Amino acid sequence: MSFLRRQLVTGALVANAARPFPGMAAGVPAFAAGWLTNELAPHVLALTVADGAAQLARGRRSRLGLALAAGNAAGLAWLVHRAERERESLERALETDLGVAYAERLDEEPAPADGTTQWRTLVNPFRFVSPDVEALRNIPYADSGRRHRLDIYRPRDVHLADAPVLLQVHGGGWMIGDKREQGLPLMTHLAAKGWVCVAINYGLAPRHPFPEAIIDVKRAIAWIKEHIAEYGGDPDYLAITGGSAGGHLSALAALTPGDPAWQPGFEGADTSVRAAVPIYGVYDLAGATGLRSAVAMRDWYLAPRVMRTPWSADPDLFEKASPLLRITPDAPDFFVLHGKHDTLVHVEQARKFVDRLREVGHSSVVYAELPGAQHAFDVFRSVRCGHAIRAVDRYLHWHWNGYRRRPPSHA
């Protein structure tokens, strides 16, 4: 491909990352084209500058190509700057919903340097191994199925007792995904700070249509309550998180503790959680919001592939699967994160979900809307991912410290 064509392609990618192409039909292509460009903007910027410099060194003078390269470099630099500013959006959300003095409840109040991007960690954004963290692989949490396995991440060579526990539920449209592919930046970060993090696999559609996925999540919660003390965790303090389909499942599990319909054979097990952190989740599977994108997802994706039944045949199934419709006054605390430019799950779903939580629930709700984020912004290390992880870290430590400082009768 010629230099000019490379710059034309890069320009289209940068434009889509800055402002994704609108419309339901363009949602998936816009995500596919813009996600990596957005999150890997520093790397694409370096390649663009190097490409332009190589052309000059070879004595080539394509004015149009070089002009495009300069424009692309400026656009990519702006994407990096926008990602850096997500720190302000996240901190503003925490201060608005928890109070400006929320940091006083942390073990240590954040220093200015804590929020700066560690550029060395971005050299290889897909490297998640940490010498301070050990991973225990493929522990069964149920008796059947190779998907009923979990991994545990915890600090290496540290004796743990009553450590806070985080359960990570992977996404992938309820049809693909694996526990070793998502949530790793957050889990390794928290495990290095003394948390016990659990990542699970679960039954995937269409072979295992809904509600098999939520049943498996609840099986894993029940296993954690019974066994996590053996690994240094506190079974009485469990938070849950996940992205996309994992955001849906984590929110739904948090809102339906003890639901006997989704706990076959373990109806009496405790499946409650203390806090939920769904990230770019799906909250309206029934189309109850009336959003065109939600109705289209219901009819063209969920019904034939995930639920394996049309909406008209079993609307109750879709409604019970919608976190938006399962909110009660007993809902646990929530920290909801969503990207404003998400083309796979419209941000309006998150807004309506948070509004309903605040209207009905009695617990705290924090909502962070990231102005420049697409879907899946936390899968690998990036500028935006780093700021999101540190915000979730602060929230979870704020929440855990509040829990453990309560009088025993309220703990």
Image (spheres, rainbow, N blue to C red):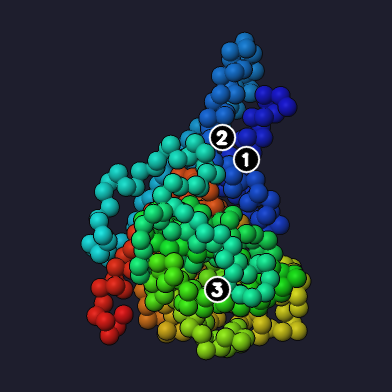
Q: Earlier in the sequence, mark 1 or mark 2?
A: 1
Dot 2 corresponds to which residue? 44
Q: Give me the C-alpha separation between circle 3 and circle 1.
A: 40 Å
Q: Give me the C-alpha separation between circle 2 and circle 3.
A: 40 Å
Label 1–label 2 contact, CB within 8 A = yes
Indicate the position of residue 397 as horizontal and vertical percent values.
33, 63
Q: Give me the C-alpha separation between circle 1 and circle 2.
A: 10 Å
Picture quadrant of residue 394: bottom left
Amino acid, disc 3: Ala
Residue 220: image tag: 3
Amino acid, disc 1: Leu
Q: Residue at x 62, y 59 (%)?
A: 178
Q: Tell me the SS state at disc 3.
A: helix
Q: Residue at x 32, y 47 (%)?
A: 114
Indicate the position of residue 217 as horizontal and vertical percent values.
57, 73
Counting the numbered discs, the total is 3
Please indicate whether residue 398 sits to the left or right of residue 125 in the image: left
Residue 13: image tag: 1
* 185, 297: nearer the viewer: 185
Mark 3 crowdedness (10 Å alpha carbons): few <14, some 14-19, many ≥20: many
Tag nearer the camera, 3 or 1: 3
